[in-house]
Amino acid sequence: MPDDPRLTRRGEAPEVGIVHLGPGAFFRAFQAIYTDEAMAAAGGDWGICAVSLQSPTARDQLAPQGGVYTSVTLAPEGPEYRVIGSIARVLVAPDDPEAVLAAMAAPEVRVVSLTITEKGYCHEPSTGRLRLDHPGIAADLANPSAPSTAIGFLVEALDRRRVAGSAPFTVLSCDNLPDNGHLVARVVADFARARDPALADWIVANVRFPATMVDRITPAPTQDDIDRLAEAQGYRDEGCVMHEPFRQWVIEDEFTDGARPRWELAGAQLVQSVAAFETMKLRCLNGTHSALAYLGYLAGHETIADAVTDAPFAALCRHLWTHEIVPTVPQPEGEDLAAYCDALLERYRNPAIRHRTWQIAMDGSQKLPQRLLGTVRDNLAAGRPVPGLALAVAGWMRYVGGVDEAGNRIDVRDPLAARLKVASDRADDAAGKVAALLAIEDVFPPDLTADAGFCTAVTEAYDGLSRHGARAMVEALTA
Ligand code: CS2
């Protein structure tokens, strides 16, 4: 109902102890909730100053509500609502970069966390090194005191703390990237070194970058969701988030002076090493998510739940886990990998979650290396074939060609979209198209494309997709 009152904060906002870059739906459905619960359980000034690096959307949604918003848990048996109050303020970096730097440089801020998506790290996906030729990075290096990228903000704020003699903050990456702590440490160090080697040395010696594994399925909310919430709760909330009941956060307990919220009281696992958890999650969950996104989209499935209720697609997940993914995953302590995969299929089937294949298909050039290609590499090294992974990679290639099986245009969102389209259009036949796409070294490392067996498997899969369509190919794989 448009005339319902807007949700607003009751009482005081918490004092800020965290600056968070990238306050999109995932952050609000995940880290902000853990932080809210940790403060409720143990107190502490861990309010969040949320910073949008690009659009003012989050500020426009949250500021009129005093930062509060509703978390909507989409359980199969019906929704549950909770108001979350951990976000104390919201800044929009392009409007006022100086306010963001001042917030990051404030000594009471002990953690700067990030959910900026894969492309926000401005790295080369196949190597993990900072792209010094990235336009945002080049601009920030030319004008370091007024940055625009997350990496530029981190380095400038750390420099201000170094100059002021205050302790550095801990940098906490919460994006779906392997070894996200080391990745952000490396791009920050690469950037700092290009600015000033002494600053880079100080950062390397003093700043902590714990790695994390994050997991909660969070589809983008729609206008319908906002309207349904208003009907159920009697208020309008433009900043609400929808998510599944499940959540898992595994964090390396490596914080400067141990300063962090008591996230473990909200169920986070604080561990020595997240590597095995991260590999499990990226390969088992995100790997099959991407496979379902490309092949499912091509087969006409709008959501993940639609795809996995179509039997061949559920069989595709099982095939991938059993034969091609789990054999490459190290055993994380306390996890049962077979049970983990069974639970994933149940999560995908949740009829209350409308997670669009198109949403997950975004930014594939940044996602493929850690979701599918590392798994391919490990299988090839062990002498195992990869028919399912090759089909998923071929599905991505068909998708980025930009035309679906009915001849309609696909809205391909990817920082490399234009290059991918040019490569795909370069030849008329499957072999030529696949060769042109495999030659994109930002995505495909040369050792992989040197493997003739892999290239042939992808080419055959691509050819089959063009001739028979995605559903028939998935069915044939799992028959
Ligand atoms: C998804 C992820 O959009 C995507 O690429 O695969 O956002 C996925 O839903 C989360 O990683 C689940 O934790």
Image: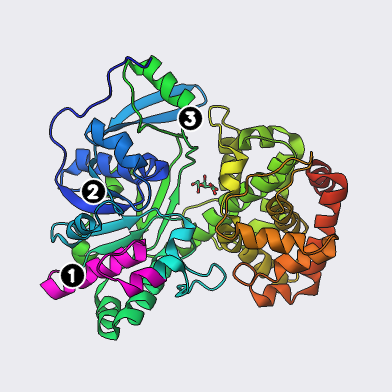
Dot 1 surroundings within 10 Å: few (below 14), some, or many (20 or more)? some
- Asked if residue 165 is among those painted magenta in the image, a careful observer would answer yes
User: Which mark identifies residue 222?
Assistant: 3
Of the 4 image quadrants, the one containing the C terminus is top right
Q: Is residue 47 magenta?
A: no
- In three-dimensional space, the C-alpha distance between marks 1 and 2, rounded to whole angstroms, equals 18 Å
Identified by mark 2, the residue type is Cys
Distance Cα–Cα, label 1 vs label 3: 40 Å
Residue 335 screen position, x and y as percent: 50, 52
Q: Which badge, 3 or 2, is on the more N-terminal residue?
A: 2
Dot 3, how many residues are within 10 Å of its Cα: few (below 14), some (14-19), or many (20+)?
few
Q: Nearer the viewer, residue 370 or 192?
A: 192
Residue furthest bottom as drawn: 197
Instruction: Relative to 99, say whether 451 is above or below.
Output: below
Disc 2 element: strand
Q: Is residue 254 above or below residue 394?
A: below
To which residue does mark 1 refer? 160
Q: Position of residue 327 (x, y in %)?
A: 65, 61
**For this view, does 102 lie left or right of residue 76?**
left
Q: Position of residue 175 (x, y in %)?
A: 43, 55
